[in-house]
Image: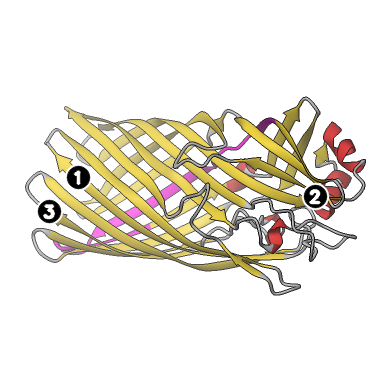
Amino acid sequence: MTGGLLLGFDLITTDIGATNPETGEHVSSSDHSNNRGPYVAPQFAYIHKVSNWTFGAGVFAQAGVGVEYGDDSFLSRGDVGGKGYAAGADTGLENASRLFILDIPFAASFKVNDRLTIGGSLDAKWTGLNLDYLLGMNQLGSLAGDGRASGSLMGVIGTLPDPRGVHLSVSKNKEISSGVDGWGYSGRLGLLYKVAPTTNVGVSYMFKSHMNDLKGKGTVTAVDGIAGNVPIEGEVRFLDFNTPAKLDVGISHQVTDKWLIAFDVSRVFWKDALKDIKLGFASGMGDVDLKLPQDAKDQTIMAIGTSYAATPRLTLRAGYRHATQPFNDEGLLALIPAVLQDHASLGFSYQLSKSGRFDAAYSHAFKESMTNRSAYNTSSPVKSSIAQDNFVLAYNYSF
């Protein structure tokens, strides 16, 4: 065999909700409007071998999730008299988000000898974001007081007779095309070493991405109890929206000719990549810049997996993964759910022919909840929860 082709997709379904601890009000994310869940992420790869070299390219979804809370939940209410999400302060404005990150690697590897293979890739990256987000006056006041909200529009909002909040909307009702998007690049290096006839060790390092600002047209709406909603059209940009560097170390051992076990440890360097979510809005009426604190921590991920060749054609797989939580409760946004920590997975491969193989897998991410009481990222405490199911189907063809 001198090459191969992979075609597949990852189907993601989520159970996401937000609760107001003070009132008990709850809203669940639905699957309509600008997010169109469930989410379908592509998988495509092509490889070609030339002597000891292997070259490849692909398209993969590195990340993708979203929420759709609609326009009539407690999250769509403004602030009145210092009370966040105040009863009767309905704005009719949506709260929703959707994030897609596509990774397009161009890779090469070289077999140094029978024990060592080294490789690397240069990765093009595309990020698309939809966001509909209401910030109450409590939240804006806290951000401004700490120098995290600035610009001429802040003064304009202060002149309104009964200001209740500001709403930002950058969304497209499309399957992939997004309200703001941008391109960038990253890369990775790795090696695979056979320490024994039945044992392999692998190490890889993915570099922090370097993304251009995510840009697009959007609307900032000043919400006032007397004047109503005052929309302002303009340009929106998200700055330094990068994916973190990541170090992976793994070992696999062929226990018998049918049974294999593997163990991986990863370190994700969030601290260097996500201190603040930085965004700006500019229009003919003025501008505003926001820095929403995240203060992410570096994350450790441990995973164990096993496979068993039940028949010459059928291989069964299972695994479990645990990750530390990189985000503090205070950095949580209701529109950006907590990072999932525990996953269990089952799967199989079936050899259809000498050249063709079908792969299928299911993973469940167990429910994770966090509560944010920080005035920087919410006008009133909000508890968010998320659980997730993934289905992966792929066809591999060797030639």
- Taking the spot 25% from the left edge, 57% from the top edge, the residue there is 360
Secondary structure beneath dot 1 equals strand
Q: Is residue 271 left or right of residue 205?
A: right
Rendered location of residue 283, percent (x, y): 75, 27
Q: Nearer the viewer, residue 367 or 328?
A: 367
In the image: residue 99, left or right of residue 59: right
**Under tag 3, what secondary structure?**
strand
Instruction: Give residue 5's mark.
Output: none
Chain part drawn in magenta: 234-263
- Determine the residue positioned at 14% across, 33% down: 2
61, above or below 256, in the image: above
Where's the C terminus, which quadrant?
A: top left
Q: Is residue 52 among what the camera can see?
A: no
Q: Which residue is mark 2?
A: 165
The spot of residue 286 in percent (x, y) is 81, 29
- In the image, residue 391 sits, relative to residue 47, either above or below, namely below
Looking at the picture, which amino acid does disc 1 mark? Asn
Q: Nearer the viewer, residue 351 or 271?
A: 351
